[in-house]
Amino acid sequence: MVWGLVFSELTTSNIIEVDAAAYIISGIIGLVTIFVSRLQEKPVSDNHPLGYSGFIPILNMIRNLMIIEICIEAIGGSIGTLIRGPTSPEHSTLFLYASVTLLFNCSCAIYTHRKANKLNSSLLKTDALEWRLDTISNISILCAFLLAFVLDNTGYSFYAGYVDPVVCIFFSIFMCINPSKLFVENMQILSIVSVDRETYDLLVTTFKKEIPVFAIHTTYFTIFYVAGILWVNVEIHKHKAIDLSLEDVFEATQKCQLIMNKGYPHNKLTHTCYLDI
């Protein structure tokens, strides 16, 4: 973030400005996320009856939206540069920025990959993949700068200036793809949406297998996501010929909660029982 902030002021390169802006946004949101992630450890309260899990997707939406906005602005700026006529490339500054950023990205990609394998964390595996994509992007930027350098030193300096804005347009379009997908995903997380059929069937099968009460009596499950929290509502209708006490219901819901906690740390369980049927 700091490296990008410095070099975004030292150069007029469109591609460095959009790349640096993305790192600055990610860095600021990352610092806020560290603070917000600690809030998730707090218990629910009157003001936050579902806990604090919804803050993370909100931050991700803001981050992705800002990156998309930066990319759109960069595309417009690059088109404007092409119309006005590009300036001569600043080779030393460009190579220094891209080389050091590549070193940072490679280090982070290796580190997160090792930690992801050690902890078997799907979150870190996704993070490691993003760092690898950033590394590939850096290599592409270095190749573009190298092409501009070759053109500038082989008598084609007029064309060398066009490399930066043209590559910036394609780079910005590429940069928009993943944030756009993540923006939509986080919007879905923050909305109330039913779980997919596979998840529903897996949970219901597990509940009925591990908790006999649910299999014996007529039980209906409503499972959905709300603000990133898995919400399971259990509706039990007592079988006429089989006894069902409130103690049995309490024990069944406790087991249900334990099953949910194993796979979904952020969850909520509600239940309704009809004993007079």
Image: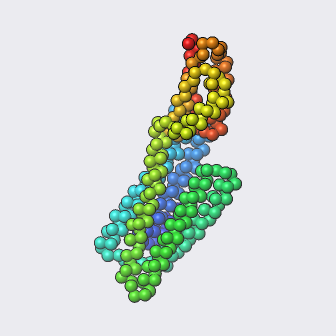
Q: Where is 262 relative to 178, above or below?
A: above
Residue 15 showing in the rendered view? yes
Residue at image position (50%, 61%) is 23
Image coordinates for residue 178, horizontal then vertical, percent? 47, 56
Q: Residue furthest left?
A: 83
Residue 112 placement, left or right of 62: right
**Tag count:** 0
Write down the quadrant of residue 231 in the picture: top right
Write down the quadrant of residue 273 in the picture: top right
Residue at image position (59%, 36%) is 202
Image coordinates for residue 253, horizontal then vertical, percent? 63, 26
- Colouring mode (rainbow / by chain / secondary structure / one colour): rainbow
Q: Nearer the viewer, residue 250 or 201?
A: 201
Image coordinates for residue 139, horizontal then vertical, percent? 52, 71
Q: Quadrant of the C terminus?
A: top right
Image coordinates for residue 171, horizontal then vertical, percent? 43, 65
Residue at image position (51%, 43%) is 55
Q: Where is 69 relative to 237, above or below?
A: below
Q: Where is 189 relative to 87, above or below?
A: above
Q: Nearer the viewer, residue 224 or 64?
A: 224
Residue 52 showing in the rendered view? no
Write down the quadrant of residue 200 in the picture: top right
Q: Residue furthest right?
A: 118
Q: Nearer the viewer, residue 110 or 29?
A: 110
Q: Nearer the viewer, residue 219 or 16?
A: 219
Residue at image position (40%, 75%) is 163
